[in-house]
Amino acid sequence: MSADGSQNLVVFKDGADYRVLTEFTREPVFDSTSAGAALQWAIDAAPAGGGSVAVGPGEYPLDEPVRLASNVWLRGSGRGTRVAAGAGAAGLVCEGLKGTAISDLAVVPASGGASTGILLDGCGDCRVRDVLVQGFSDYGIAMRNGSFLCELRGCRAADNGTANIYLEHLTGGDSGELATNLVTNCITYGGRTGIECRHTLVVNIVGCAVYEPGRHAYHLHDESNSVLISGCRSFQAGGHAVLVEHSHELNVSSSIFCWHRGHGIVLRDVSWGAVNGNEFIDQGVRSHDGAYMKGVDLLEGTQGVQVVGNTIFNWGDQPPMSIGIEEDATCRNNVIAHNNINYYTEGAVASAGAGTQATANVGHGEGAYLGMGREPYPDFTRGRLETFMRR
């Protein structure tokens, strides 16, 4: 059986079989007892100039990864299409592709130990949108090795063991250096880290939300340079809301980071950047070691950064911060200005860096502006979220 290459293809589950039909004439062109074989056949048989493979509702267990092709759109029927990856493998793999799209389906592990839901490796101008990726041992969605001009949009990534969304070694692909990637309108929940960038250049993370990660909400490290985090949120992180290490050209703006056990944002060895117009709320909520936390912490030679126009506060039913903004003596030439800070024990701003200007900040530490008049709010747990994820 073969497709004539002029029609898109449809894959659907029919009892114990998986069948492939042409989209318009409904001609049967392939069937198998293996979901992976049917999906792979349809992708490989898609029109040469590009086309779509529509996948019907049902469970599609994979013995090995399904490999996408350039200019092919793999589209499910919403979360009713469940692609289940086998142990130790990724589910859907895009490697060295151009113009590929994946949308409207769920990717889950068939059993424990599947590593990654969706992998983009060395790809250009590819898109992943409106997918749910949940429960993998390492990553929900991973994009790596020079992928460029790619977009993750409207995705949900939950309960993945290392990071829900992971970007690595994005330092320029076939287009040359500094071609941006975009992560937008994505929501992650549970798992270890919400969104992590390792050795990643020129990424916009816009309009995303991270809920109850076990560790940090947003983690940038190992020369993840020229990264924008804007219009984003985090809530109830087990670590810091934002941790940036050994990375430069940073912009964190117009975001809200709330109710985290660690600090609001920590910058270690960061050169050039802007942390402007954010709200950092309830730092150090029930920190396990009992230490009071900070809104902004500048460390290890951070230089040339402006921390301007942020609102940093803890509600009255939480412990106070120790310091709103602190800069250690290894830092230099930063600007800390026009921040409004409330509810702390030691001070609004403590700046020890050479050449740093700390000016026009407003602080009130004696009590929270909204004292609440009640006992401290109970510690947050992930019990309800765990129940929701297992539902």
Image (tube, rainbow, N blue to C red):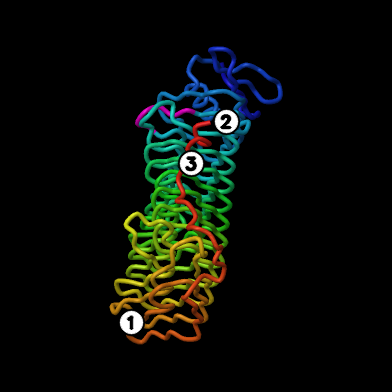
Q: Amino acid at mark 1?
A: Gly
Residue positioned 65% across, 23% down in the render: 22
Q: Where's residue 25, x and y in %? A: 71, 21
Mark 3 surroundings within 10 Å by alpha-carbon count, few (fewer than 14), some (14 through 19), many (20 or more):
many
Q: Where does the magenta region start and end?
A: 84-89
Residue drawn 47% across and 23% down? 61
Give the mark nearer the N terminus: 3 vs 1.
3
Amino acid type at circle 3 is Ala
**Residue 83 higher or lower than 385, as above or below:** above
Residue 141 placed where, x, y %? Answer: 46, 43
Taking the magenta stretch, the answer to whether it contains residue 86 is yes
Helix, strand or loop for disc 1: loop
Most common secondary structure along the magenta stretch: loop
In the picture, the disc for residue 158 is: 3
Q: Quadrant of the N terminus?
A: top right
Does residue 263 appear to the left or right of 211 in the view shown?
Answer: left
Q: Tell me where residue 292 sits by quadrant.
A: bottom left
- Image height of 199 relative to 5, above or below: below
Number of other residues with Cα within 10 Å of mark 2, as a class: few under 14, some 14 to 19, many 20 or more: many
Residue topped by disc 2 = 46
Q: What residue did someone put label 1 on?
A: 353
Horizontal side, residue 269 vs residue 59: left or right:
left
Rendered residue at 36%/70% (across/down): 270
